[in-house]
Image (tube, rainbow, N blue to C red):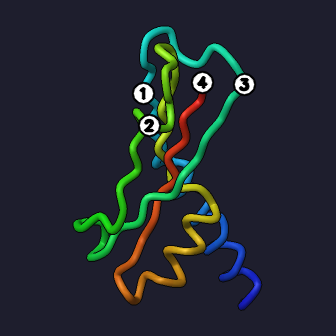
Amino acid sequence: MKKILVVLVVITMLFVVSCSTNIHKIGKGAQGGDVISQRQWYAVYGLAPLNTVDTNQMAGDVQDYEIITQQTFVDGLITSILGSFTISCRTVTVKK
């Protein structure tokens, strides 16, 4: 019974994590293989940002790039641990 519960929790986490990805194409989208990632931290269940992730600075002088905002598996684990303190996070990635 305990193994079934663990398997169901893991499967549920995978489905929840995969549903929270946003992709924004700027210009023609990513043209190369450069990838820069930073983690955005939130308090009070996402209502108050704790840091600022500047995608313009991450992109630099490039005119064509993609911004991907998602909650990865690692973000889900961090949020599950820090969730009782109302702290959560998301990963912001810029592909050039």
Q: Earlier in the sequence, mark 3 or mark 4?
A: 3
**What amino acid is at disc 1?**
His
| Spatial CA span between label 4 and label 2 | 12 Å
Q: Name the disc covering residue 57, or none.
A: 2
* Residue 60, percent from left and from top: 49, 28
Q: Earlier in the sequence, mark 1 or mark 2?
A: 1
Q: How many marks?
A: 4
**Residue at mark 3:** 33
Rendered image quadrant of residue 47: bottom left
Q: Name the disc covering residue 96, or none.
A: 4
Q: Earlier in the sequence, mark 2 or mark 3?
A: 3
Left or right side of 11 for 67? left
| Spatial CA span between label 1 and label 3 | 17 Å
Dot 3 falls on a residue whose secondary structure is loop
Q: Earlier in the sequence, mark 1 or mark 4?
A: 1
Report the residue that reaches farthest toward the front: 61
| Spatial CA span between label 2 and label 3 | 17 Å
Dot 4 falls on a residue whose secondary structure is loop
Residue pictured at 51% horizontal, 58% vertical? 39
Report the residue that reaches farthest toward the right: 3
* Residue 56, percent from left and from top: 40, 33
Marks 1 and 4 in Cβ contact (< 8 Å): no
Quadrant position of the N terminus in the picture:
bottom right
Left or right side of 48 for 75? right
| Spatial CA span between label 1 and label 4 | 12 Å
**Residue at mark 1:** 24
